Image (tube, rainbow, N blue to C red):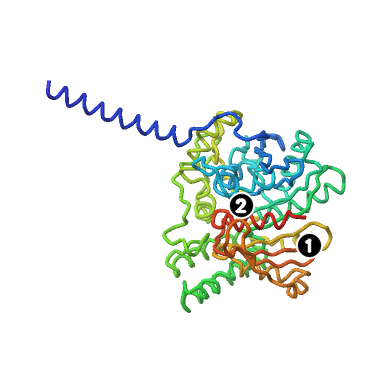
Amino acid sequence: MKNYCLKFLEHFLLFSALLLVATAFSMKYSFDTRKSFKGESWDYVTVRPKAHMFYWLYETTHPSGYKERPLILWLQGGPGGSGTGFGNFQEIGPLDVNLNKRNTTWLQTASLLFIDNPVGTGYSYVEDKKALTTSVAEISADLLTLMQAFVKKHPDFEKIPFYIFSESYGGKMTAAFSKVLYDAIQAEKIALNFKGFAMGDSWISPVDSVNSWGPYLYATSIIDDDGLAAIQTIAKKVEKLVNEGKFVEATGAWDEAEGVVGRVSGNVNFYNIMNWGGEGITSQQEESQTLKFQPEIESHLGPLYRRHVKPLYGNSLDELMNGPIRKKLGIIPDNVQWGGQSKEVFEAQGTEFMKNVTSTVNDLINKTPLKVVVYQGQLDLICDTLGAEMWFDQLDVAESFESATRVLKSCKSHPVACYYQKEYKNVQFYWILGAGHMVPSDNGYGALDMVNQIIAS
């Protein structure tokens, strides 16, 4: 009888513990699974055979209504980072990953459109690996197809001012897509009131970024003379391979360069040099067993993916997107797991990573009326400000821009110095203080104030 009672007590305690965990999970994500915001909608667009892209629209909460406010498209980096997940719940959407209201959401000033891009990212998926994109040109073509379907379904947004904001590799995609979109508008293939685009901590000129790592870390006392020499040596290897057009080999050297940086710096955080002790956003997510392609031999792309994309699918976010949000949306196919194809998306761009798109930015400044914006987090390393200024100085507008006045701005919504800003004609540059690679996460008030400055006209 004694053993029976102990056994019963053991099972009772286990059951109680499981019940508490289940209750806590339910309370954490307790929200109405119906549409939570006025004008909120989502859908899939089949951009090509066997290639399906997912988007999520929020109409602004601004008192004047969505017809009187701009629409902002957010393009996440990676490639393979989910805009509907990370950009939405970790950076600029109305709710955070715990489903609490975000004080600095961009929704209060503009409508927001998140796209899981390139196809295969987030909730987007391909039925065949051959349908993945391998270049920013292919990514741009898919985005154009999606936007054509979007404005057909939501015609009110044809005349509303339209802006693209981006982060990291998303900036490279934004430069390419902006040219494609502008040309399509001129050719009357799509109706959009395209006003401008903003590239945040963007991978525009990989060689300039890599070449700047050593001087930046040296200036911030993170490495010594020996560390500087080691980083500069591997950076020159990257530059040589790029100049020779050996982009696959250059990507391998980029991976080597990050290894050298980690070794000589004591594993500095690539996304925020003040955030010691790892990347700051971590992930234990297992790769999806649904729509999963055959694994290939590990290459330099594996470590790069684990450093720069897998953390965007962190535990809490994965739990949210593959649980309550999936249930709320109600249209995600059973065999699709959020983020299940992100590694394949990243690897498919393997020949594209180290290519430079500075000339595309230059043409858009010179040949279009679009507002062209660069914004940089002060504490970012992977796409640091020093590297951004190096490629920016190669633009035709650089000399004239240099003579413009640089202004220190305090946030209207927060009484601190938020950023420096400089403007010349249709070009703006923002230096965001106290922020790393993910500017809206690190300095939400500064990012929101910047957005209001950009869309003010």
- Dividing the picture into quarters, in which one does residue 251 lie? bottom right
Camera-side residue of 62 and 197: 62
Question: Where 35 sits versus 146, above or below?
Answer: above
How many numbered marks, from 0 up?
A: 2
Q: Position of residue 248 (x, y in %)?
A: 61, 58
- Dividing the picture into quarters, in which one does residue 352 lie? bottom right
- SS at badge 2: loop
Q: Pick whichever of labels 2 and 1 is earlier in the sequence.
A: 2
- Dividing the picture into quarters, in which one does residue 122 lie? top right
| Residue, far left | 2
Residue identified by numbered label 2: 77
Q: Nearer the viewer, mark 2 or mark 1?
A: 1
Residue identified by numbered label 1: 426
On the question of residue 347 being in view, the answer is: no
Question: Which amino acid does the dot numbered 1 rest on?
Answer: Asn
Q: Position of residue 147 (x, y in %)?
A: 75, 41
Whether residue 322 sits left or right of residue 351 in the image: it is left
| Residue, far top | 1
Question: Which amino acid does the dot numbered 2 rest on?
Answer: Gly
At 67% from the left and 63% from the top, the residue drawn is 245
Q: Are marks 2 and 1 in contact (CB under 8 Å)?
A: no
Whether residue 139 sits left or right of residue 87 in the image: it is right
At 65% from the left and 38% from the top, the residue drawn is 56
Q: Position of residue 261 (x, y in %)?
A: 49, 67
Q: Position of residue 250 (x, y in %)?
A: 60, 63
At 67% from the left and 39% from the top, the residue drawn is 57
At 78% from the left and 73% from the top, the residue drawn is 400
Q: 10 Å neighbourhood of mark 2: few (<14), some, or many (≥20)? A: many
